[in-house]
Image (spheres, rainbow, N blue to C red):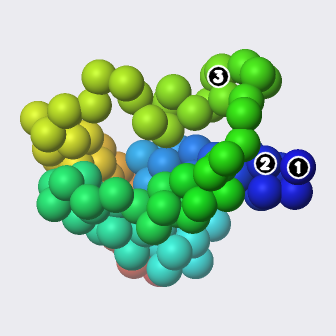
Amino acid sequence: MLSQVLADLLVVIHFAFIIFVMTGGFLVLRWRRIIFLHIPAALWGAFLELQGWSCPLTYLENHFREGETYHFEFIEYYITPLVYPSALTRQSQIFFGLAVLVINCVVYTWILVRYSRKKRRTNISS
């Protein structure tokens, strides 16, 4: 029972990490210091996908699930398929890795443009 709870907790953490990798740049708009967490996380997520490697959390989740039976609970039914799509291919992994890089490059470019405009306005009004 404890191993099942730990496996479920890891799936939720894994899902939250994926969401953070994809959208964390937007959080940087509000809290700048998150950039120091987000950029390494985004690079790690893209690297894993582009290399075709599994996240270490996957191995840990599998370890906790060994010998356990599951009866279509919420996490298993709704969250797990998002973390581990059944149709995941090498091509889709490459697509996801590139999507992480492109999305975050666009977001950080927007942040830099916005920051430089704001800084320019501050310098002009001084």
Q: Which mark is residue 4?
A: 2
Residue at horizontal 62%, vertical 51%? 66
The local crowd at label 3, few if under 14, some if 14 to 19, many if 20 or more residues have their Cα within 10 Å, is few
Residue 68 or residue 37, whichever sits in front:
68
Q: Measured along the vertical axis of the image, is residue 27 above or below residue 56?
A: above
The residue wearing badge 3 is 78
Residue farthest to the right, as pictured = 1
Could you tell me the amino acid type at mark 2? Gln
Residue farthest to the front, as pictured = 67
Q: 59 left or right of 114? A: right
Q: Measured along the vertical axis of the image, is residue 105 above or below residue 35?
A: above
Q: Are marks 1 and 2 in contact (CB under 8 Å)?
A: yes
Residue at horizontal 55%, vertical 53%? 62
Picture quadrant of residue 105? bottom left
From mark 1 to mark 2, how far is it between C-alphas? 5 Å
Q: Position of residue 60 (x, y in %)?
A: 57, 64
The residue wearing badge 1 is 1
